[in-house]
Image: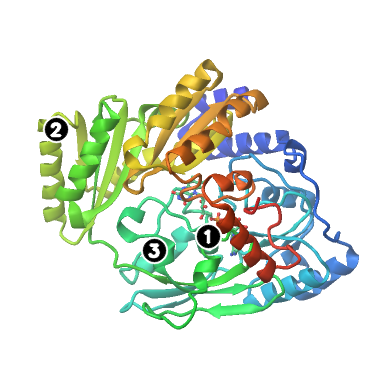
Amino acid sequence: MQQILQRASSTARTSRTLIIQQVQRLLSTQLEFTKDRYNIDRGKFGTLDDTHYGYFEDLLGKDRVIRDPEECEAYNVDWVKNVKGMSKCILKPKTTHEVSAILKFCNTHNLAVCPQGGNTGLVGGSVPVFDEIVLSTTLMNQIISVDDISGAVVCQSGCILETLDSHLAKYDLMVPLDLGAKASCNIGGNVSTNAGGLRLLRYGNLHGSVLGLEAVKADGDVVDCLSTLRKDNTGYHLKHMFIGSEGTLGVVTKVALQCPTRPKATNVAFLGTNSFQNVLKTFRKSKHSLSEVLSSFELIDAQSLNVVTKHFGKQCPISQHPFYILIETHGSNATHDEEKLHSFLAETMSDGVVLDGTVSSDPSKIADIWQLRETITAALQHDGYVFKYDFSIPIKTFYSIVEIMRERLGESAVTVCGYGHIGDSNLHLNITLKEYSEEVHGKIEPFVYQYTSQMRGSVSAEHGIGFRKSKYLQYSKSASAIGLMKSLKQMMDPKGILNPYKVLP
Ligand SMILES: Cc1cc2nc3c(=O)[nH]c(=O)nc-3n(C[C@H](O)[C@H](O)[C@H](O)COP(=O)(O)OP(=O)(O)OC[C@H]3O[C@@H](n4cnc5c(N)ncnc54)[C@H](O)[C@@H]3O)c2cc1C
């Protein structure tokens, strides 16, 4: 790997993608199977035979039933190369009817299924643990309707977030969600993880933006809750059960989203400051001064920015500081918003809270600044093995866990950094090592979860529980709540065929 990375620095920028792919491929072949690393026993599920394959091939056609081991590999390994399954069968339905037929058949034959969207999930929920069939929604990518008056948009669950957003631009609408994985993640995956992202501060979470959805239960039954109404208080709000259930209660096939009007004016400020206290002061002031136009407030610590400059050769647009803040505004009057942002910057700088900063309304500069934030996750991969944490922590103590872990791990970690959605009190603590070490793992977990729980935080703010965090669910959910979750699972999927080994402890 070292050789590949060395070559990366001497090769032109254009070949970077190729090199990242080479590194990713190398890391995935070196990866142990999840079942071995975590010592998991296989559930009592059936094993695929020729009769099963025959049924799937009749239903979908041979080209939508993937059996080639090399092709299956990409569906078996997660984005961060932390977990690796052994599925020998990937199914690619195009319609709800096909999903329903697949699940009905799998339920009857007791075959386990792992639903997968863009496979960008960060908690090991999207890939199998053993030989579960991967039900990939990537071909379910039709945009069904756009109502440019109400903003209600209906699409199939396999639509890629960025593709949907580009389509909506024609109607002056936008998807109320944005994240670094937008070029690959699917709307169904976003809904199933209740993804938060970069603008939740302004546009709220998916429990608010999803107007309705359609999902298929484990037994193949299609649950139609595809309302496009903003107000609908008829009975239980069943859509919420599927939002954030990470493929354990049903496969989401269609989604109706409330999409806001696309902003006419976007501005971005990139600021530097010397203490976390000053980050908080800046956040407080931004809510007062920028109020209705504030759309994002992101934190990047110096260590996070360093990995981006080190591995991707990006330049920091301002002088170096321990903490950086990215502020974005979305509004309807460019001059008005720019003036607001400039006077906000002037005030925070004259107070000595912000030490340096730059403001831009130029789309290419805005994209460059956003890249500094959005590529942190990918850059960290180049350090080696990454431990990723996604905590909600009360804002005043937000950053303390990063400092504690830095001290606790000392030289054994390559990078200990913190970044994230400060506007939502959501911290991404990341710890990288040259390679996986059980000893260091023991120093990190369960300590970080216990600490978060003591702070009355959440062990997963937005990424979900998946495979990697199921045993830590108890730090954020009471025994009675976990009991109710288990009852729901039993009712909706009595044989437990949907995404086994995930979410529930
Ligand atoms: C660079 C990068 C940046 C990221 N930034 C953010 C961020 O800011 N905020 C955030 O919340 N997340 C973020 N993520 C995590 C990830 O992108 C999100 O969790 C995303 O919502 C996953 O979508 P996906 O289509 O890739 O789902 P997958 O990874 O394929 O699946 C995720 C989970 O959902 C289930 N699932 C997928 N599709 C369906 C379906 N149709 N029906 C039922 N279950 C399904 C899977 O079984 C799995 O449990 C980031 C990831 C990366 C790599």
> Does label 3 or label 1 sit earlier along the sequence?
3
Q: Residue at coordinates 16% horizontally, 56% vertically from top-left?
A: 334
Residue sitting nearer the eye, 206 or 257: 206
Q: Residue at coordinates 26% horizontally, 44% vertically from top-left?
A: 327
The CA distance from mark 3 to mark 2 is: 34 Å
Q: Amino acid at mark 2?
A: Met
Q: Amino acid at mark 1?
A: Gly
Q: Residue at coordinates 72% horizontally, 71% vertically from top-left?
A: 103
Q: Amino acid at mark 3?
A: Val
Q: Is mark 2 within 8 Å of ligand 1?
A: no
Q: Circle 2 is placed at which residue position?
A: 349
> Does label 3 or label 2 sit earlier along the sequence?
3
Quarter of image, res 275: top left
Q: Is residue 301 visible?
A: yes
Q: Please identify the residue farthest to the front as the structure is shown.
A: 480
Q: Are marks 3 and 2 in contact (CB under 8 Å)?
A: no
Name the secondary structure under disc 1: loop
The CA distance from mark 1 to mark 2 is: 41 Å
Quarter of image, res 495: bottom right
Q: Quadrant of ligand 1?
A: bottom right
- Local packing at callout 3 (Cα closer than 10 Å; few below 14, some 14-19, many 20+) is many
> Compared to 497, does 366 lie above or below?
above
Q: Which mark is residue 244?
A: 1
Question: Where in the figure is residue 39, as x and y percent of width and height?
Answer: 77, 39
Residue sitting nearer the eye, 216 or 362: 216
Question: Where in the figure is residue 385, as x and y percent of width and height?
Answer: 60, 31
Q: Circle 3 is placed at which residue position?
A: 175
Discs 1/2, front? 1
Name the secondary structure under disc 3: loop
Residue sitting nearer the eye, 354 or 160: 354
